[in-house]
Amino acid sequence: MSSNQNAYASIGYKFLLLEHVALQDPLSVSVAILHQFDILPDMYQIGYTKLFFRTGQIGKLEDTRNRTLNDILRVQSCFRGHKARQYLKELKRGIFTLQSYVRGEKTRKEFVVLLQRHRAAVFIQKQIKSKVSKKRFEDIHGATVVLQAVIRWWLVRRCSGDITLLQFGSGKSNE
């Protein structure tokens, strides 16, 4: 087969871009493809099993086919890029959600520890304040007892045996 003649089936499979004509016979598929690419009927001739093209027509078909395939590949590449970016965005969103969850769990655990420490500090402060208050009370109580003892001793010395003077107010109201 020379370069200017092709079997119907090879044209159909090589240049087939429309799916609805794929179920027809190879001759009608080949003619539909030629009409799709605007190849005029005087630029080719139909034989029993082959198509015969004039010079340059196969090159024109091949160029159109290559441009179309490149455009298809470009669209597919753009779509794959879009899907990859979409997947990456979804993956990032999942990562952010997971990080947020982990940070929340970590913060909650730290809060529990912090709350325990706070309660322990409050308990220690309460115990220390209680001991300081108790010590202060004991100091004041001891000083009061000593002061009372000194006053009683002074009163006893002053009165030197006069018991009526020791009874406050009773001796003076009788006189």
Image (cartoon, rainbow, N blue to C red):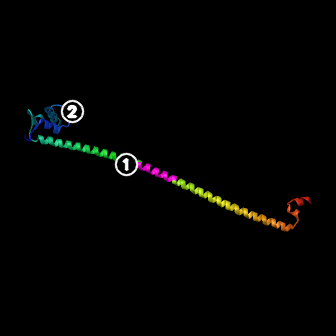
**Residue located at (70% from left, 60% from top):** 137
Q: Residues within 10 Å of mark 2 (few under 14, many from 20)?
A: few
**Residue located at (21% from left, 44% from top):** 70
Residue 39 appears in view:
no
Q: Is residue 1 left or right of residue 162?
A: left
Marks 2 and 1, how far apart at CA: 42 Å
Q: Quick one: SS at disc 2?
A: helix
Where does residue 8 sit, x and y in percent of width and height?
Answer: 12, 35
Q: Quick one: SS at disc 1?
A: helix
Amino acid on which disc 2 is placed: His
Amino acid on which disc 1 is placed: Lys
Which residue is label 1 attached to?
Answer: 92
151 or 55, which is in the foreground? 151
Q: Is residue 147 above or below residue 64?
A: below
Q: Which mark is residue 129?
A: none
Q: Is residue 96 left or right of residue 25?
A: right
Q: In the picture, residue 167 is in which quadrant?
A: bottom right
Q: Is residue 99 magenta?
A: yes
Q: Which residue range is magenta in the image? A: 98-112
